[in-house]
Amino acid sequence: MARAPFSPGAAGARALDAADELRNLRRQFELPHERGRTLTYLCGHSLGLMPRAARRVVDAELDRWATHAVDGHFPDERHGGWLDYHTQFAAPLAALVGAARGEVVAMNTLTVNLHLMLATFFAPSSKRYKILIERDAFSSDRYAVESHLRWHGLDPKSALLEIGPRSGSFELDADQFDRTLKAEGERIALVLLPGVQYLSGERLDLAAYSGWAQAYGCRVGFDLAHAIGNVPLALHDSGADFAVWCSYKYLNAGPGAVGGCFVHERHAEAHDLPRFAGWWGHDRARRFLMEPQFAPLRGAEGWQLSNPPILSLAPLAASLELFATAGLKRLRRKSERLTRYLEWLLMTELGERVRILTPRDPARRGCHLAVQFDPPPRKAQTLTARLRAAGVVADWRQPNVLRLAPVPLYNRYRDVYDAVTALKRTLDA
């Protein structure tokens, strides 16, 4: 008989935690609690936990506002000033997405950035006017895409193409993608896909999908909401035209936090590209001359509209410091082991009662697993409430999917063990 990959029971989880080289990072986060107990939080795919340093960095900006008022915009011996505040995020974000510093910018929120990118990179013609997305795209992406089609007088029924999962699977059908490109490639203006699929947790090969689409002359964009801070990325090398992301999931910058955008270097000085313009995207050296002619900054910064909301951007600094401390390679190594442990526990404790929809190869998934139940749980709509009563915070998607996300920055193996134990008790109740 083959040896089990993990030791059973709470003692096995404790042993894994004792050997975890990143275990002390958990102390850098505020852990949710109620009625005197710390909750087991596996919902970082929806909202990341608060770094303890977030309060300090926000308070520092509040103090600067209180002390300096308008002069807070300008640098002094201790602070770079608010005018260039957003520039401190370019290097760490570029490292997380695999890009050059000039290819990224922290600005706006995800769907706002998507609209800005669509305004530039979706330029339909009589020949090329279609957009290709995944059938199960996150709803906000679909709304944005359909709105741009209608803005251009196009009917989504004929101009929106979709690819779905392989038969009998939740994984995107690469063969269908290839067939669609062969049939429609010359009419497709833009392909928009996720880096990690929000429901199933599948990690896409960005370079492969980008290369296939660009071989047919399509422009390519990615939604990295569930990918940034979760899986290694190489956006520049992928050749994608653009990407957008939010910062409140795996980047732990807080609810409604400032998101980000990538624009490939080849477009850095393409000032003839159509875009929505605002003064924060204007030549920094001439911004306050209030000239009538817009002169965009080089690179992704040239798509900025307004000065950034400092108090909403500040918490991101606290989180990115922790990523720098941990290192993405070590985080990814722990993430893969956490999901392997979660998968093993689910199959060991629940067996044929669960089906894991996420790819079984850890290299092809992020840090959340999507679980389907057979049969569906009784009173499925109350499952997460019953789990919460047992001290576990998870996420339910109708009609029959539970998402569990052990995040390597702050989750322990004991969290995974406690969650599966509580899930089994809840299903058996």
Image (spheres, rainbow, N blue to C red):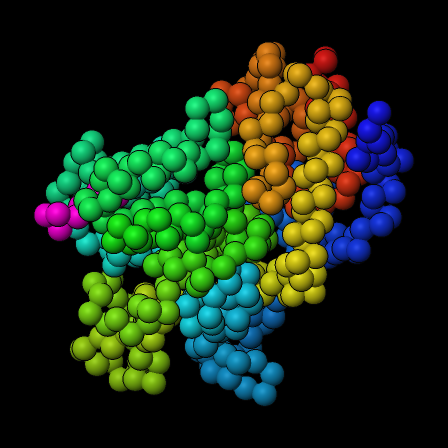
As for residue 251 lying within the magenta part, the answer is no
In the image, the segment drawn in magenta is 125-131
**In-front residue for pair 54/392:** 392
User: Is residue 147 something one can see in this rendering?
Assistant: no
- Residue at horizontal 76%, vertical 44%? 412
Tell me the residue at 49%/26% (across/down).
Answer: 169
364 or 377, nearer to the observer: 364
The residue located at (48%, 48%) in the rendering is: 205
Quarter of the picture containing the C terminus is top right
| Up-down relation of residue 156 to residue 168 (above or below) | below
Q: Is residue 209 left or right of residue 323?
A: left
65 up-or-down from 232: above or below: below
Image position, residue 262 (x, y; %): 41, 61
Image quarter where the N terminus lies is: top right
Residue occupying the point 58% across, 50% down = 230
Per the picture, the main secondary structure of the magenta-coloured stretch is: loop
Vertical arrangement, residue 136 with respect to residue 313, above or below: above
Q: How many marks?
A: 0
Report x, y in % for residue 174. Answer: 41, 38
